[in-house]
Image: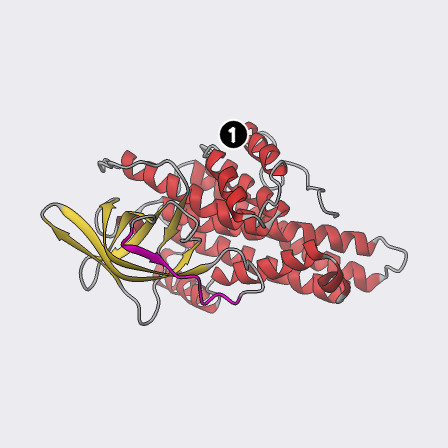
Amino acid sequence: MTDGDHLALPLLVPDDTPGLGGVRVALERADAVDGLGTDIAATLAWAVDVARPTSVAATWELLASVAARDVAAARVLEPHLDALTILSEAAASGFALDLDTIGTWGVFAAEGPGTRLEARHDAGTWTLHGTKPWCSLAADLDRALVTAWVDDERRQLFALDLRDAAVTAHQGPWHARGLDRVVSAPIDVEGAPAVPVGDAGWYLRRPGFAHGGVGVAACWWGGAAPLRVALADAATGDSADQVSRVHLGRADTALWAARAVLVETARVFDAGGSASEGLRAARARTVVADAVETTISEAAHALGPLPLVADEAHARRVADLQVYVRQHHGARDLAKIGGDVARGGGAW
């Protein structure tokens, strides 16, 4: 797969999936962006123009197809779309929101040792105080949805204007080789006003929390799909042998299985979900993460070092994927899945 070539749409979901027309428009515009994924300002400007798909399946198709073009571009688009979806869910749940949604958005919900962001309520106004880690592109975005502690045990979601003078975005530490332009560093907040989005705990309770988590996995899957193309090219070359076909076979079956899981999960979520959406999402993310890591490994062994040092697009794709898929919690997620199943909540 050479620079400028793209996998056929639809990449992930069936061709009759509602909403694919809007996905095609978004991808056509993406293909016209000079520096998609490498020029953050240009990529964000494109993301603002992307109409939010109306179904889970169409959203994941868009994310996977963007990642097949450029992993970092999908990493930029995914939280922006997720934030707009969360705001729509909050409004649909009856929460009054007096917000300007114009511009670029992020979602900052991670926690880290030694840092804490607190929300204080005084005279009808909420303000945020402290430090929030892992705030991707905070220096480049207009606004973000941010979780903050409202007491010792509960967190609540707030909309924060990142351009407020009380918000300081760090430039690092960020020594990444993958996703090097998508800086994920702390922000310091010293009394910036914020707008509550839902009540305490709503962010984690809402059905869309599971949907968003698998949307990230759709990005991983789409980012790995071109590596399968590279493996197929190698397996049909003049020097191809059985070993090269074994590498291709392993990657192909892993990605095929992950695709089936994503399609089925999207179907269930679009149909109204189930009582075990969180478990279903965790299973799907685990299957996809394993498939992506298998594909990266098979590509490394089959193709050797040459594309990693001589093919800029390939080398950047692998480096970006290796950082991005680390958002998966690996053994900890498996332990949680096992715990849910052991407690009797693991019906298929």
Measured along the vertical axis of the image, is residue 5 above or below residue 108? above
Residue placed at 51% from the left, 50% from the top?
75
Q: In the rendered view, does 329 fall on the left or right side of 226?
A: left
Q: Residue 279 placed where, x, y %? A: 41, 54
Q: State how many labels appear.
A: 1
Residue placed at 47% from the left, 56% from the top?
283
Highlighted magenta segment, given as a residue range:
165-175
Measured along the vertical axis of the image, is residue 73 above or below residue 181? above
Residue placed at 27% from the left, 50% from the top?
157
- Amino acid carrying mark 1 in the image: Gly
The quadrant in which residue 269 appears is top left
Circle 1 Cα neighbour tier, 10 Å, few/some/many (<14 / 14–19 / ≥20): some
Q: Residue 198 placed where, x, y %? A: 24, 44
Q: In the rendered view, does 213 fall on the left or right side of 252?
A: left
Pointer 1 residue: 19
Q: Is residue 283 magenta?
A: no
Of 69 and 287, which appears nearest the observer? 69
Q: Is residue 347 visible?
A: no
Residue placed at 55% from the left, 47% from the top?
73
Residue at the extreme front of the image, as rendered = 165
The quadrant in which residue 32 appears is top right
Q: Residue 289 placed where, x, y %? A: 55, 58
Q: Is residue 168 magenta?
A: yes
Q: In the rendered view, does 99 fall on the left or right side of 290?
A: left
By secondary structure, the bulk of the magenta-drawn segment is best described as loop
Does dot 1 land on a helix, a strand or a loop?
loop
